Amino acid sequence: MGSLSRTLKELVTPTRRAGLLVAGDAAVLVVFAILGRRTHDEATGFAAALAVLGTALPFVLGWLAVAPLLGALRGERTRSLPAMVERSALAWLGAFPIAVAIRALALGRFSPWTFYVVAFTVPLLMLLAWRTVFTLVAPRFATRAPAPR
């Protein structure tokens, strides 16, 4: 277990924290796309990987456009659970309209309002769940900067 702990400590450095958050956020949004496609009996397996990524892409792009601007990836604004929840929810509130616009442009149409209720709520809850776990677990593995001499 010591080797795994050392490996995790090397992963969760202050400079890699934002990268880990982005990777986890993108994974969550891809899982949301998979779940949505399965709900509608659309292909989700390995052969449908491009279709799944196409479904997830508007949400990922919206998130990546807004999350950095609103501090959802900054260490000082994501270390405590209340700050992480606040920043994540605020960022999703800003990212969602962008995602909807990208999706509507790609499809050439808007979806029914029920889609937007689900597509806003479910990814928000999934992002908050993932980010809560990250916020609670990451400090256990974070490396500390050496004290100044």
Image (cartoon, grey):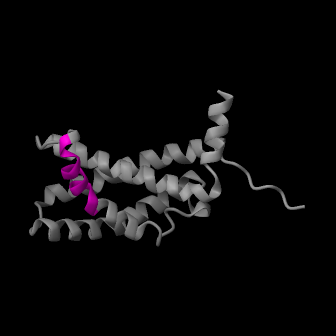
Q: Quadrant of residue 116?
A: bottom left
Quarter of the image where one finds residue 38: top left
Foreground pick, 125 / 69: 69
Residue placed at 61% from the left, 59% from the top?
15
- Camera-side residue: 117 or 76? 76
Q: Give the magenta part as a residue range.
A: 47-58
Residue 148 appearing in the image: yes
For the view shown, which residue lies furthest in the top direction?
A: 1
Residue 44 showing in the rendered view: no
Question: Residue 56: within the magenta?
Answer: yes
Residue in the image at 37% along x and 48% along y: 27
Residue 40 on the magenta span = no
Residue with the most extreme front position: 47
Is residue 91 or residue 143 the one in the foreground? Answer: 143
Query: What is the quadrant of the N terminus in the image?
Result: top right
**Residue 132 percent coordinates (x, y):** 49, 46
| Dominant secondary structure (helix, strand or loop) of the stretch shown in magenta | helix
Q: Is residue 136 positioned above or below 87 on the image? A: above
Q: How many marks?
A: 0
Q: Is residue 67 above or below residue 146?
A: below
Location of residue 75 in the rendering, given as x and y in whole percent from the top left corner:
60, 60
Q: Looking at the picture, does residue 133 appear above or below residue 51?
A: above
Vertical position of residue 62 compared to residue 145: above or below: below
Q: Quadrant of the C terminus?
A: bottom right
Task: Estimate the x, y position of residue 83 in percent, counting from the top left.
Answer: 55, 58
Residue at 52% over, 46% down: 134
Left or right, residue 44 beside residue 132: left
**Residue 12: x and y, percent?**
61, 49
